[in-house]
Image: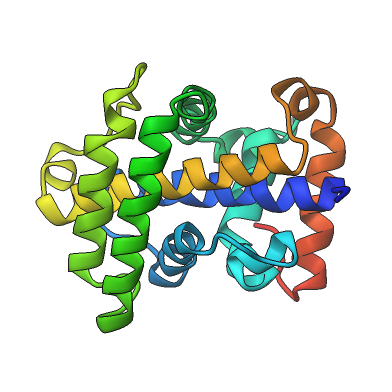
Amino acid sequence: MSYSITDRTIAIAGIYQATALVQQIASTGSLDEKSFETCIKSIFTIDAENTVDIFENVGNLELGLNTLINQLGGNNEIIKVQKNMHVTKYAIGAIVLEKKLSKNKTMLNEIRSGIELAKNQARHFTVIHENVISNLADLYSKTISTLSPRIMVQGEHIYISNPGNANKIRALLFSAIRAVVLWRQCGGTRWQLIFQRKNTINTASMLLESSGKRTN
């Protein structure tokens, strides 16, 4: 199957949506629930006919698309103000970890089994129920978190040290890595991300317009 820059942009938006939510929790102790649910659902969606189906629809990626535009934007002074280097650092960290994870077949099998268990649990509760999020966070801690370099989240200690928030952060980092896997499957590379930055930003803007959303 051939993939387009639209597919890759959707996947990158998934990475940025998850990492933007991580920073929301770390700095404010709260997050956008709808965007959070989209990220968690994507972890459980393995087989989909189209890239966008991983996130159900483009509208669910509004936060990720806007964050992508803001983080990858050029020299515009307004965009510079909106950039958050922590968000980009988490995104880069997810890309690095995914590459290491892809070579660890034992860990990949453990993750697949753990995700299936959490997916079954979600059928009895909800996708973002605290028990489901706790299980995903625990799976992340036992697997991906043992790889190096670990993603070190920075923010307000009062929020990061909260057990519920810590679980959400780990589950979101899981989602970010799942989006990296999708990006790789769509033919994404780090060099491509650098040299096709302008096209990626333009594609993200078009996706927002097509979904009836506006850029920030």
Left/right of residue 207 with respect to residue 27 in the rendered view = right
> Relative to residue 77, is residue 57 depicted above or below?
below
Q: List the single residue furthest toward the top.
A: 149
Determine the image quadrant of residue 34: bottom left
Q: Which quadrant would residue 208 be assigned to in this image?
A: bottom right
Residue 38 left/right relative to 196? left
Q: Residue at x 19, y 67 (%)?
A: 130
Q: Nearer the viewer, residue 146 or 206?
A: 146
Residue lying furthest bottom: 124
Residue 24 coordinates in the image, percent (x, y): 36, 50
Can the viewer see residue 18? yes
Residue plotted at (70% across, 53% down) = 10
Residue at point 50%, 31% (across, down): 98
Q: Nearer the viewer, residue 128 or 46?
A: 46
Tell me, yes or no, if residue 28 can be seen here: no
Q: Position of residue 131 (x, y in %)?
A: 18, 67
For image coordinates 70% across by 59% down, the residue present is: 215
The answer to whether 26 appears left or right of 39 in the picture is left
Residue 80 drawn at (x, y percent): 62, 33
Instruction: Name the one closer to the observer, 75 or 51.
Output: 51
Residue 198 x/y as whole percent: 84, 35
